[in-house]
Image (tube, rainbow, N blue to C red):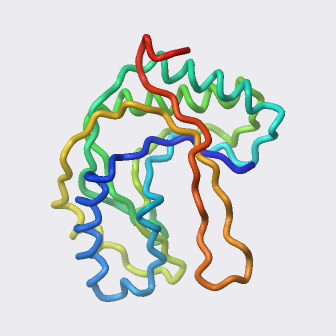
Amino acid sequence: MRLFVAVLPPSARLAELGLAVDELQTLPGADRLRWADRDDWHLTLAFLGEVDEAVLADLHDRLARAAHRTPPFELRLHGGGRFGDKVLWAGVAGALDTLRLLAERADAAARRAGVPMDEHRRYHPHLTLARSRAGLDLHPYTESLGAFEGAGWQVGELVLVRSRLPVAGVAGERPRYEPVGVWPLGPGQGA
């Protein structure tokens, strides 16, 4: 099954971001972007790809330990940016060192459980808002997002998410995400 490890912002924080995205969608060319489904907005910590079911039990145990070793921490959605002319994203502020540590622990848990991970890259926290295949200039969107400042929240859990890819050739079909494991952060929360 296709999996990734994530932090899921609470619905109230996503609703704040949704108001900013509503404004973005009024900008010229917004109809040429493929906007991410708001119900699926998340902060990916580690993308695992296809995972053999034989390693799932060990992966769950290792992710539980990673969560147990990481205390709850504060984040807020903040500003935005882009990856070239392909991806528009919302930024994150707050306890970024702890977020990066949790991402490293999730990556290490997957590797130790036997998940073949791609080459390790420095973690860049972001929430993907839209993708462009048309090479649209994303600068107006990032400028508009620059003033966005969401309220903070306490990250309290680590989530393993299954990604079901869209059916090829079906118009409007999008990936579907479903949590398959959730672990509270912090000592005393189970190991």
In the displayed structure image, the side of residue 140 where residue 41 appears, left or right? right
Task: Tell how many labels.
Answer: 0
Judging depth in this view, the residue of 57 and 130 nearest the camera is 57
Please, is residue 31 above or below residue 17 in the view?
Answer: below
Residue name at image x 47 percent, y 16 percent:
69
Please state the horizontal and vertical placement of residue 191, each as a whole percent of the image.
55, 14
In the displayed structure image, the side of residue 165 where residue 124 appears, left or right? left
Residue name at image x 76 percent, y 37 percent:
116
Residue name at image x 40 percent, y 51 percent:
126
Residue name at image x 58 percent, y 56 percent:
177
Residue 110 occupies which quadrant of the picture?
top right
Judging depth in this view, the residue of 113 and 100 nearest the camera is 113
Please state the horizontal and vertical placement of residue 79, each as a whole percent of the image.
24, 56
In the displayed structure image, the side of residue 72 where residue 66 appears, left or right? right
Please state the horizontal and vertical placement of residue 55, each as a whole percent of the image.
78, 31
Please, is residue 102 above or below residue 91 in the view?
Answer: above
Judging depth in this view, the residue of 156 and 6 nearest the camera is 156
Please state the horizontal and vertical placement of residue 70, each as a whole percent of the image.
43, 20
Judging depth in this view, the residue of 184 and 143 nearest the camera is 184
Residue 63 occupies which quadrant of the picture?
top right
